[in-house]
Image: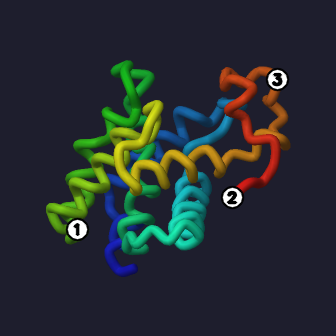
Amino acid sequence: MERVNKILYHPIFRSTLRQIERLESERIFCLHNLDHVLSVARIMLLCAREEGIEIAKEVLYATALLHDLGRAYQEEQGGNHARLGLALAKDILTDCSFSEEEREHIVTAIANHNQAEASDPLSALLQKADKLSRNCFLCPAYQECYWPELQKNQGVVL
């Protein structure tokens, strides 16, 4: 997990995460902080193992850690946060010694994580874990949430 630890200490990752935390400091809905991305990573790993999907643990964790970086620019630039963070993710992955093939898989999953259908197993795992990381059934902002009722988690389901 050496490369994942490099991501956690990467200056772009850290500064972008701090920017997201500042932007969401008054947010009543789900946050996109380190706790969130680590939860997504752990759920991705569990789901992959349960479903018999063979993807390297470092790739799963890297995907989860980097998937919401675009939130730092969404309000300012508008558009899809999944797409806005791709350039940052590529730079971080390159600096942390992920291969070209790994980078392409990870970036594809990040780009697709909020689309209707996943195009590959890594994208599907990210979509599933991102949703399952939310404890909607305990959220104090449940009634104000803009998610459709059928998308809100009503319990812990894997």
Query: Does residue 95 sit above or below 15 in this rendering?
Result: below
Query: Residue at point 32% right, 33% down?
Result: 84
Picture coordinates of residue 15, whole percent (x, y): 39, 50
Query: Residue at point 49% right, 54% down?
Result: 125
Q: Split into 4 quadrants, where in the image is the N terminus?
A: bottom left
Q: CA distance from mark 1 to mark 2?
A: 29 Å
Q: Quadrant of residue 138?
A: top right
**Is label 1 in a helix, a strand or a loop?**
loop
Residues 89 and 52: in front is 52
Query: Does residue 3 sit above or below 15 in this rendering?
Result: below
Q: Quadrant of residue 68?
A: top left
- Which residue corresponds to mark 2? 158
Tag shown at residue 143: 3
Q: Residues within 10 Å of mark 1 (few under 14, many from 20)?
A: some
Q: Amino acid at mark 3?
A: Gln
Sequence-earlier tag: 1 or 2: 1
Q: Residues within 10 Å of mark 2 (few under 14, many from 20)?
A: few
In this view, the mark in front (2 or 3): 2
Quick one: which residue is furthest to the front in this view? 52
Q: Split into 4 quadrants, where in the image is the C terminus?
A: bottom right
Residues 10 and 62: in front is 62
Q: CA distance from mark 3 to mark 1?
A: 42 Å
